[in-house]
Image: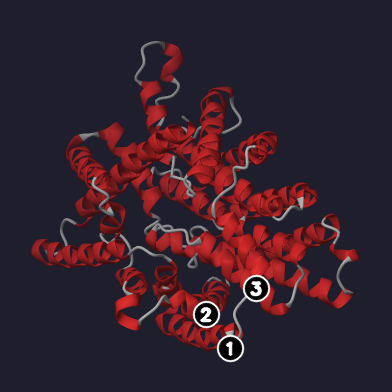
Amino acid sequence: MPRTEPQPTVFSIPTLSLLTPLCILGALIGTETVTRLGVTPNTALLGALSGMALARLPGAVFARFAAPRLHSLAQGAIAAASFGAGQALLLPIGTPFLLGRTDLVGPLFAGVFLALLVDGWLAYRLFGSPALPANAAWPAGAAAGEVIRAGHEGGRDGAILVAGMVLGAVGAAYRAPMAAFAVAFIGNPWALGSFALGLLLRGHAGSLFGGDLMRVQIPQGIMVGAAMVALAQVLWTARGDGVRRAVGMSGAAYLAIAMLLAVAGGLHGAMAPAMLVLFIVYAALVALLHGVIVGLAAMHSGWLPAFAVALIALVGGLLIGFPAPALCLLVGFAAATGPGFAAMGYGLKSSDMLGGGGAGRRQQFLAGMFGFAVAGAVVWLGQGDYFAAGRVAPVGWVFVTTIQTGVAPGAGGQLALWAVAGAALQLAGGSGRQLGVLLATGLLLMNPAAGWAVLLGLGVRVWFTRRTRGTRRAEMAVFAAGMIAGDALANLADAANRTLSARR
């Protein structure tokens, strides 16, 4: 991609004329799918392909849409709107509605919207540092960047990319985990091996151990220990790059938001002063940890274990003894961080692949924040209709049930025991491998097929690298990006079909 290409600016008429309708569409997709299917598909490629399609229409008015970096802004903005609206905003505010505390919906919405903005800003500040290197996998961002680049340059890489897209789409149509197979070609093999091990252990726990590991707090405990060490590693590995300042500022912002939630939610009148202070500090720490951990998992594997990690935060709040209204605000606040971090990271990865440099990153950041802003408007205007129809994200019922039933006796001891194991594994692997975080991510997901797919992909990667003596690694990465793109488009089409069927 030519480095002399002018960098489009977000707040210009041509750019906004593309980004605004895409973000509204992306936010609607996010809210519809999270309430009907429980997940939010990645819409990034829809944004990129829309810009590329407009550029091919005749007429001078459409020629302005031909810039590849504009397509990167489009894919980043629509993805931010989708993840922001579905997972970071509408999902959290469904919990107080289900608990019958509609008075908490407004305060929680204000808190999670602010948290979403802080989450995106932190990803922007950390991206490209040793903590979150730009050359890491970032699978969805790499796929979008390759699609945009190959769509403009064509040639051999374009043909390889299309072949990968076809294979990814066909495999996804038959429910094969193609993205899991493909990410093994471009990610850190140690991290992905640990991720695959976690997926397989959780998926086959019944036959191996006689029960679900989640019931004895093993995945949750490992994630708690790994998360604490991972945050320390982030601060240590990038101590000279302004990362400590960025993390500190984000932590202070989360602390202020937690105070806002406590006051606006009326907790100051229902909790003892010491418990109120503990709630504010715990909520801020959980929000920061949640965002960083979900971001690290997304960077290495492409998976976002946001729901499961938020549930761990909720269990911690139950063990401390917070009352139900505080737990409701706590789990919503935690769930709001992470999806925006991942969406911003993916967008920045695409921008870097297209040679945007520092100016490109700044505009990509603004595009993501614009997407978050549109998501906030769409959710706030539509949440009344969703709740009136009884439509909330399914995981909201899990949060509510956990708040109402509490945790089993001995859960705290089990969490502490396995937290030590998670911390030790994360420490042994180092920040580059993220063994503890990725093992816990796999253990929190029930998808053994994806575990086998990752292992198969790692095996093919080793075989291909040895056969070609490492001379065709770039082509392997392009092919993998194509498979991820094909898988994403197929899953987006499937989600749209299932959502439309549910509306009938």
Query: From the viewer's perspective, is residue 357 above or below residue 215?
Result: above
Find out whether the residues at labels 2 and 1 contact each other: C-beta distance under 8 Å: no
Q: Nearer the viewer, residue 372 or 208?
A: 208
The disc labelled 1 sits on which kind of residue?
Answer: Gly
| Residue identified by numbered label 2 | 221
Nearer the observer: mark 2 or 1; the answer is 1
Q: Residue 145 in the image: x percent, y percent?
A: 37, 43
Q: Nearer the viewer, residue 244 or 212?
A: 212
Q: Residue 175 in the image: x percent, y percent?
A: 27, 50
The disc labelled 3 sits on which kind of residue?
Answer: Gly
Nearer the observer: mark 2 or 3; the answer is 3
Dot 2 or dot 3, earlier in sequence: 2
| Residue identified by numbered label 1 | 413
Q: Residue 336 in the image: x percent, y percent?
A: 62, 55
Q: Nearer the viewer, residue 322 or 162?
A: 322
The disc labelled 2 sits on which kind of residue?
Answer: Gly
- Give SS at disc 1: helix
| Residue identified by numbered label 3 | 406
